Amino acid sequence: MKHFLRVVTQFFVFLYCKCLWRGIKFVVRKFTGRCELQRICYNNKHGARRTLKIESSLRFSKNELLQSALSVHPDKVEKTIDDIMALKKINPDTNPQLSISLQASLLQIVGYRSLVAEVEKLRREPYDCENPEHEDMLMKLWKELRPDTPLTSRISKQWCEIGFQGSDPKTDFRGMGLLGLHNLLYFAEHDKATALQMLHDSLQPKHNEVNKPEWEQKNLDKAIGYSFAIVGINITDLAYSLLVSGALKTHLYNVAPEMPSLLHFQQTFCYLMQEFHRFWIEEDPSDIMEFNRVRSKFHRRILRQLKNPDMALCPHFSASDLHLVNL
């Protein structure tokens, strides 16, 4: 019975999308004198609310030109807008704002696709200890996070001090490739004070009754509950999943005036790192074994926020301006 009802529901949805909705659009255009793209641009302010509707309109259009507009090269956007205006028989002289609005939204759409490809390329590139550029980035990360402590050797247990699992960090980058290293280094370089504070907090004992001398004799993996670098790689994975699933469109369309870039993604990562730090403290897990539970709960919270088309996770981002919980 449930299967039958599901089939019937799908049939009526199909009927609505293919027939009734197109009929409604035809009537509305005749009544208002405006096509769907015009109505979207004139009735919605710039940002995710407008761009998401334009993206949906183009994707489900029957016209090949409109469908292909979603995947044009950024250099072809202006010509594509001219072609759309001609197709819809819209006079650009009497509708100058329409062309500007469509161009801004289409740049956001194709820019998001380009960003996904760029992030995916970084994620797929493995860390290579024979590559001088990779090694240089890793050494920079150490100097940013441990400025007063020289690294005794490339393979060293000292890496655990900034939250790696073993004596060679390259093994921890397997899942996220160079993307994890890029994000960690960006955070450490562009908001050093906050990164150092988070690293310091992550190494503190969970219970105040443990005095410092006693604590320093214990293992680093029994600190407040997480390892800074490993969490950074995990949050990179979370940010990546938000990006490729399209959930991050809401945020990026609201903060990027035109094409979202890798910079926007890295700023979002920094924000997520700080919010996770705050969330971890609020959840007060008993130990690191609860990490997956806390991460999943945090992920769900971010997804709920991104369902609001007016949501911007970190508008006008400045990590140093965000309050960090003082442990």
Image (spheres, grey):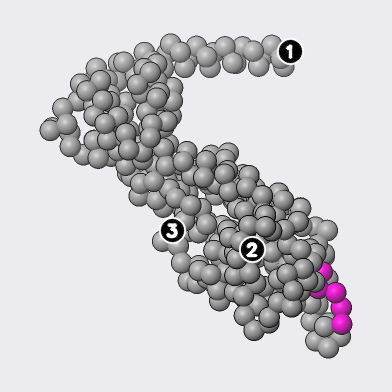
Q: Is residue 175 left or right of residue 12?
A: right
x and y percent of residue 20 in the render?
42, 13
Three-letter amino acid code at the position of disc 2: Glu
Q: What type of secondary structure mainly makes up the magenta span?
A: loop
* Disc 1 residue crowd, few under 14, some 14–19, many 20+, Cα 10 Å: few
x and y percent of residue 5 in the render?
66, 14
Distance from Cα at disc 1 to Cα at disc 2: 61 Å
The earlier-in-sequence mark between 1 and 2 is 1
Q: Looking at the image, is 277 positioned above or below residue 118?
A: below
The earlier-in-sequence mark between 1 and 3 is 1
List the single residue furthest toward the left. Answer: 93
Q: Which residue corresponds to mark 2?
A: 135
Q: Looking at the image, is 187 positioned above or below residue 113?
A: below
Q: Which residues are magenta?
A: 217-221
Check whether the beta carbons of the residues at disc 3 and disc 2 lie within 8 A of each other. no
Position of the C terminus by quadrant: bottom right
Check whether the beta carbons of the residues at disc 1 and disc 2 lie within 8 A of each other. no
Q: Dot 3: what SS?
A: loop
Front residue of 234 and 303: 234
Q: Which residue corresponds to mark 3?
A: 315
Q: Dot 1: what SS?
A: loop
Q: Is residue 220 magenta?
A: yes
Q: Looking at the image, is 284 positioned above or below residue 21?
A: below
* Disc 2 residue crowd, few under 14, some 14–19, many 20+, Cα 10 Å: some
Q: Which residue corresponds to mark 1?
A: 1
Three-letter amino acid code at the position of disc 1: Met
